[in-house]
Image (tube, rainbow, N blue to C red):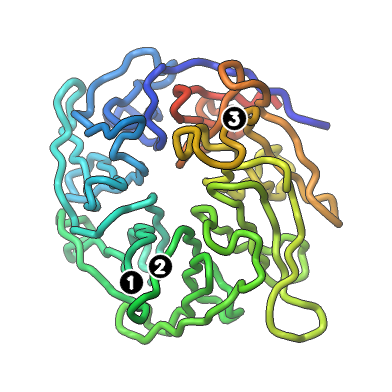
Amino acid sequence: MSLKWRRAWVSDENYEAVGIFDADNDGVTDIISGGFWYKGPDFKKKYSVGEVKKYGEYYDDFSVIPLDINGNGNTDFITGGWWGNTLRWRENPGEAGKEWPEHVIAETGNIETTRAWDIDGDGVIEIFPNTPGSREVVFFKLQTKENGLGTGKFTRHKIFEFPEGQRQRHGLGCGDVAGNGRADILLCHGWLECPTDPLSGKWQWHEDFSDAPWRNCASIPMLVVDVNGDGKNEIITGSAHGYGLWWSERRSDGSDGWTHHPIDPYNAQYHDLQWADIDGDGVCELVTGKRHRAHCGNEAGEWDDLGIYYFKWNGEAFSKQIISYGPIGQSKGCGIQFALADLRNTGRLDVIAPGKEGLCIFYNEG
């Protein structure tokens, strides 16, 4: 049985990334998107975070990654964008209405978007920007004090550099591809095998996915999950700037490579993917949707209907369930980074969807 959803408008602001955390330490979850944060639990009152530079239809703000960076008990967040060429963090002032100062972590080049994973297992996430034009693959680790609290400073770790003429490209993921329990890093045309010590060891590059339908423009993230319950991880990838969504498994004949199975070949701009138990049955589903006007109306599928969906594994394939679907101007996409959270303490995950068409919540009514 499909879930029921109730749409609630939050703002007409057209930032494309959103994050969920307690911004004012009152014990209630708030919504943070671009230049504003919205106070929970009703999200009607909004406060300024600070100016976010705008470039045409875009804001230079393609991620919201919560983390107490300076160790003062207030949750800050990490962002970055295509035009500023920098990875940055905004410092939570601890008081509603005050501006959140911005600090540069590093000069990186153009950032498509940023994600975070705990690569070394110390309980603190590492920060991974996807910089398609760069030869270097890097992550940034928060420096901490002896008590584990952040210092406000990061160390840069280069794990690979492509030869002259090759680039990182569009796409990024993290998960155990090698089958040894470690967190490998995926790019759209291969993957980096995580060494025993991910901070000082050598990461091995595996050129791969040569016949993949997303070859030059993979989603961020590319998911590494056990889709079919066979004890081995598969990969779920969307076409971030074209049509299609697929799950891929190792070839059963023992040869190198992957078999790519279509999940939804007829919809476009699957930019952000999440793997979560959306229906409360104890099994994760794929949650994703379209990024509206990803390239300002200038690529395949830009003018198709908008949609947000969850896909449920039925033992043989994925069954598509609709959260929102319809014409542009009436329905909703999910931006470059959407969020899932139980906003009302119902035990059900709600969907918080930013984008050029505004910021909305889809409340999960079960």
- Specify whether residue 102 is in view: yes
At x 64% / y 21%, what residue is drawn? 327
> Is residue 124 visible to the viewer in this orientation of the structure?
no
Label 3: which secondary element: loop
Q: Quadrant of residue 133?
A: bottom left
Please report the residue visible at 30 percent of the width from the left and 54 percent of the height from the top: 110
The quadrant holding residue 13 is top left
Amino acid bearing label 3: Trp
The residue carrying mark 2 is 168
Q: Is residue 148 left or right of residue 280?
A: left
Give the amino acid type for the residue marked by disc 1 in the picture.
Answer: Arg
Mark 1 touching mark 2, by CB under 8 A? Answer: yes
Q: Which mark is residue 135?
A: 1
Q: Nearer the viewer, mark 3 or mark 2?
A: 3
| Quarter containing the N terminus | top right
Residue nearest the observer in this picture, 334 or 4: 334
Crowding around mark 3 (Cα neighbors within 10 Å: few <14, some 14 to 19, many 20+) is some
Q: Position of residue 197 (x, y in %)?
A: 37, 82
Q: Is residue 284 above or below residue 201?
A: above
Chain-order first, disc 1 or disc 2: 1
